[in-house]
């Protein structure tokens, strides 16, 4: 088996500008919890991709470890390459291309928000009742009712918290011949970033892969914002 190049992915590899990241981090038109959203930047050699070929898919987690989880995600990536005209092989010796993928999720960032609680502090309707002596003896009752415009003010505050997790997926496709060179260049590189409340990468990886491969391969150098209907259970 040929020597494999391990690619470790971190959020800093994506090359997305702050403005691009902000666009998907702070605007969900579909409502929270319904969609997985992200950004994918794609570079490719279109002519080489159009020829297809036999691809061997190799995956690791963000620490460079090959695990049962990475193998499971590798199969999902392979299915998309197959859909786009490649034949997925299980032995690198039979491959014309090798696809490397890496993925990861951070520990989350929690933000806290405080807002005031408004309550009535005075005014409104007041009723007074009592008893009085009446001429000739005995007791009588009386009542008095007054009304004042209600007064409202801040009576306290409440604090809420929200934790967001950054998820990352990197896919690179190489021709076998290129891996024999000292500094091989891929013919495809897709880097994807997604942020949301789900802390489990397994629950959102399907949506991230689907978003990454939308309009595949797309325009070289393009940054695509995508939104995929979520089926996760976090």
Image (cartoon, rainbow, N blue to C red):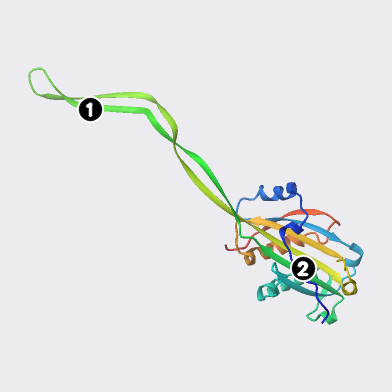
Image marks 1 and 2: residues in contact by CB distance under 8 Å? no
For disc 2, the neighbor class at 10 Å (few under 14, some 14 to 19, many from 20) is some
Q: Residue furthest left?
A: 136
Nearer to me, 124 or 3 = 3
Mark 1 lies on a secondary structure that is strand
Q: Position of residue 63 (x, y in %)?
A: 69, 68
User: Which residue does the image show at 60% across and 61% down from the upper left?
Assistant: 199
User: Which residue does the image show at 83% across and 68% down from the upper left?
Assistant: 173
Mark 2 lies on a secondary structure that is loop
> Is any part of residue 33 visible from this angle?
no
Residue named by callout 2: 7
For disc 1, the neighbor class at 10 Å (few under 14, some 14 to 19, many from 20) is few
- Measure the C-alpha gap from mark 1 to mark 2: 82 Å
Say left or right for 192 vs 150: right
Tag of residue 205: none
As displayed, is residue 137 above or below residue 2?
Answer: above
User: Which residue does the image show at 52% across and 48% down from the upper left?
Assistant: 160
Q: Position of residue 80 (x, y in %)?
A: 77, 68
Say left or right for 212 vs 47: left
> Is any part of residue 37 visible from this angle?
yes
Residue named by callout 1: 129
């Amino acid at each position: 088996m040929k020597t494999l190049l391990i690619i470790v992915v971190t959020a800093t590899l994506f090359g997305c500008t702050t403005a691009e990241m902000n666009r998907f981090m702070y605007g969900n038109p579909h409502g929270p919890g319904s969609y997985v959203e992200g950004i994918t930047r794609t570079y490719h050699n279109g002519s080489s991709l159009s020829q297809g070929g036999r691809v061997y898919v190799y995956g690791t987690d963000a620490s460079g470890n090959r695990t049962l989880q990475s193998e499971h995600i590798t199969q999902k990536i392979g299915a998309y390459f197959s859909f786009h005209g490649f034949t997925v092989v299980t032995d690198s010796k039979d491959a014309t291309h090798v696809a490397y993928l890496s993925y990861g999720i951070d520990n989350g960032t929690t933000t806290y928000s405080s807002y005031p609680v408004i309550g009535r502090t005075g005014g409104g309707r007041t009723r007074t009742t009592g008893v009085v002596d009446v001429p000739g003896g005995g007791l009588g009752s009386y009542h008095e009712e007054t009304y004042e415009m209600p007064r409202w003010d801040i009576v306290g505050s409440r604090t809420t918290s929200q934790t967001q997790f950054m998820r990352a997926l990197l896919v690179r496709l190489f021709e076998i011949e290129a891996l024999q060179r000292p500094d091989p260049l891929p013919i495809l590189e897709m880097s994807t970033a997604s942020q949301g409340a789900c802390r489990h990468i397994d629950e959102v990886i399907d949506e991230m892969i689907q978003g990454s491969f939308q309009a595949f391969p797309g325009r070289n150098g393009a940054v695509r914002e995508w939104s995929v209907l979520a089926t996760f259970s976090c």
